[in-house]
Amino acid sequence: MRRRTRAVAANLAALKAETAVKFVSPDEIREVPVEAIEPGDVVLVRPGERIAVDGEVIEGRSEIDQSLVTGETAHVAAEKSTAVYAGTLNINGTLRVRVGAAAEGTLLDDVTRLLDKAVETRSGYVRLAERAAQLYAPVVHLTALATLLGWVALGASWHDAIVTAIAEARAHGDLSENAEYDAARAQQGFIEGRISELEAKLGNAQIIDPKLLDADGRCVFGATVELEDEDDGSEVTWQIVGEDEADIKSGRISIVSPIARALIGKYAGDAVQVQTPGGVKRYEILDVRYE
């Protein structure tokens, strides 16, 4: 039982995300350590990502797999005002989540803490079993030695006697626990799942050359769009790309981001409005290029 409890604790530990994508401004995101996220911050959770925080959905719709945290196998629908928890898996939609707890105080932390306490708590029966286990190995070794000497005394060769003694020892089994092995297996399962996820994405990927697009000046996937902020007059240039290619620092925004959704289908000279956590932003499209 203690071994299974440790294995479950190791599985839960593997679910903890080390980083999260945080909104550092209404239009800029940055991947930061979970320790740098505070309650009230807003984070972005893309499809296929594990949620790194406890919080509440403020924008987006998706389904959440909570099975490894709550035990519920059915996916849970997530939309505005839905509570989500660290360690759960975002299935098919992009979410914005307002943080309630991040590095400490999450549901995953509470469950892990209870499991750790269960592992450390030793009843009188467990202590008695451990004392018996300490005597078990010497008893097995003495039994194997007695088997060896007995077969030699009966005229068996040393080789046959040793083989028989080893078989006798192995037949008694091994009471030792291997939490490190269990943790490694849990981590292996997590990595293999991630590899399968990436293989599926690569299998469905398509290469699009923006220079070959014929969109008649419209904002489409792959287009580079030059915008002017109507509030302060600043200019910014973004290329609309897939979710896995998005990188705000490099001027690439995801096709599922609010601003990309507002731009799709528009032309140079059009004005767009984007709802952000900081309020409504207004932009004028200065130019649409395919490069």
Image (tube, rainbow, N blue to C red):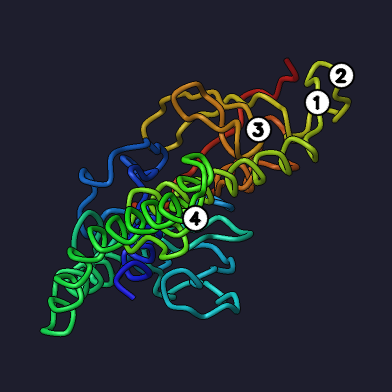
> What's the amino acid at mark 3?
Val
- Of marks 2 and 4, the one in the foreground: 4
Mark drawn on residue 212? 2
- Answer above or below: position of 236 versus 267: above
- Of marks 3 and 4, the one in the foreground: 4
Quadrant of the snapshot with the N terminus: bottom left
Locate residue 173, reporting x and y percent: 42, 63
Residue at the spot of label 1: 208
> What's the amino acid at mark 4?
Ala
Q: Secondary structure at mark 4?
A: helix
**In percent of the image, x 87 and y 19: which residue is there?**
212
Residue at the spot of label 4: 167
Q: Secondary structure at mark 2?
A: helix
Query: Is tag 3's residue or tag 1's residue first in the polypeptide sequence?
Result: 1
Q: Is residue 156 left or right of residue 32?
A: right
**In percent of the image, x 32 and y 65: which residue is there?**
54
